[in-house]
Amino acid sequence: MEKTIFNLTSDNKVGRVIGVDTSNIIVNVDNSEIMTKLSIGHIMAVKGNFEHELLICLIEKVTRSQLDMLVMDEIEEEDMETSTNDLIRATLIGTFKSVDGTKRNLFKRGVNLFPNVDSECYLVNGENLQRFMNILDNEVKKSQKLIVGNFANDTNSQAILDGDKLFQRHASVLGSTGSGKSWCVATILEKASELRYPNIIVFDMHGEYASLTKGESKIAKGFKIAGAGDLDSEDTNLIYLPFWMLNREEILSTILDRSDSNAPNQASRFTAHLKTLKMTSVEDQNDESVKRSFTVDSPIPYSILDLIALLKEDDIGMKQGAKGMVKGDWNGKLTRFISRLETKVEDKRYAFLYNPREECNNYNWLNTFISKLLSMNEDSKGIKIIDFSEVPSDILPVVTGTLARILYDVQFWMKNDKRTPFTLLCDEAHLYLPVKDNADSVQKQALYNFERIAKEGRKYGVSLFVVSQRPSDVSRTILSQCNNFVVLRLTNDRDQNVVKNLVPDSLKGVTDCLPILDVGEALILGDAILLPNRIKLKEPKLKPESNTVDFWSKWNEIEPEQAELVKAIRNMRAQSRIDSK
């Protein structure tokens, strides 16, 4: 029979339990020599009710107070004795069993039986810690292991996540600017790329992950939402998101002015013509099955110029009255709506949406587009990074939300046994997934789509990986659906409180270290890791282009060049990097 991994002796004995509640214990330290070895985040083992069982705790507070004791009635300073009262508060994390049926040396999260007062407590360090970390390693199947770094309190032990649990139950990476979020994401993508068929789609808001798509050692396929300067390019990696992929509400959120007194009339006529044009497209394809059941929201190509023409007919339409021709029911009521729509169509910044390539309006183009993002082929990497950096901020939520909705809907309508799971990694999520109370009509469309995925996606093999520097500005619904958190340094009180409210009460004390985490250090919490603790994250081989600028050093090295300023102004006017060299 295999012996227990713990060798608990008087040398590593800490003391005895003097207080117990549902998530914490208070320990009175009676080994004064060990006090210098105790620190926040260290692991303690508490003897349970059974010989083969130990409760595992994380130290979250260490205190020492002086106790003055009188030795005689006449109080004299020199006649007083001083002693110390050393106390530890620790969070109950899980249970270790040296024997569990036919199994040996198992650790599981959660506590079934709480320790008694006077239960003995031991510091888990040295060889005991090494053997315990090996047990945690063995608890995760080899095929599911995701190594992200090393434990801060034992740098020789690897921090291993369960890859299945990390991605299937939604996750988030949260941390202030410069804390190491991008490196963390790059490390996880790097590990995922070692799998045979990874399927992760990264929504890259600033183009900082482009380095992962270049060179011989690239780990991802790069795409870019077409910008104003890309309209004549033949690059097959440019993405167009034609207007007909947007549903009725998504289009109206970008065009309709709800404060306009004619808004109901405008929405009504728009909807009527939309359905007519889509019906025409389906009839041209002789697709009887779609014709019987399609709706106004079905992604069916139609001509936006034809839509504008029909709206203009309504806007100037006449009808027969009692005394001759009079203004039609819609006459003059659609003028502003048409003007706003035409403005969007003519603006080259929105060309990827309202004026895409001609082939994007073909009935079967959607098949090619979705296959490019969700399937595998010789030219495609399983990880796809989409650069959204040139998408105008006013429609960014609609663009991200529409793309997420289309990908999810395809997965929803696929046969159960044919689905390949995929993850949407949402970088800078606060830009398009805000708190609902603060969202405008455009942002609410994105929220609806992403919240639907957060609530239901797991059933259909779709998960979210949310990345943000301001968790207090991200949808509470989406964050509350995340079962795993990689939290880097957070200095803002509001952001810290959001994280504390998301984790179980028993772990709130562990999160007190968030403001003092070093760059590249993280607190990992959730189902994916057996022992929540501080982790020193691994450095990725391919680093994102997100390094913090060294202001002081640059001011001493680089002189501003007028020629470069002129180029930048020209690029700004062209809304394209025409002078990038």
Image: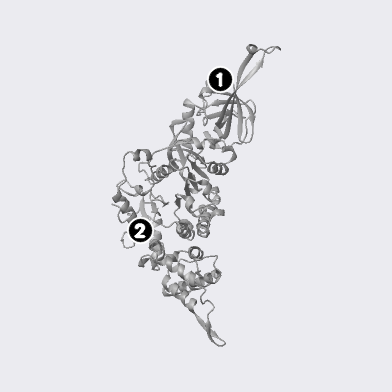
What amino acid does circle 2 point to? Arg
Q: Is residue 104 visible?
A: no
The residue tagged 1 is 32
The residue positioned 34% from the left and 47% from the top of the image is: 211
Residue 209's place in the image compared with 156, above or below, is below
Residue 108's place in the image compared with 467, above or below, is above
Q: Residue furthest bottom?
A: 323
Assign a secondary structure to mark 1: helix
Residue 400's place in the image compared with 208, above or below, is below
The residue tagged 2 is 573
Assign a secondary structure to mark 2: helix
Write down the quadrant of residue 112 in the picture.
top right
Q: Are marks 2 and 1 in contact (CB under 8 Å)?
A: no
Question: Between disc 2 and disc 1, whose residue precedes?
Answer: 1
Q: Residue 403: horizontal and vertical position, in percent?
A: 45, 58
What amino acid does circle 1 point to? Ser
Give the label, 2 or 1, closer to the camera. Answer: 2
Colour pattern of the rendering: one colour
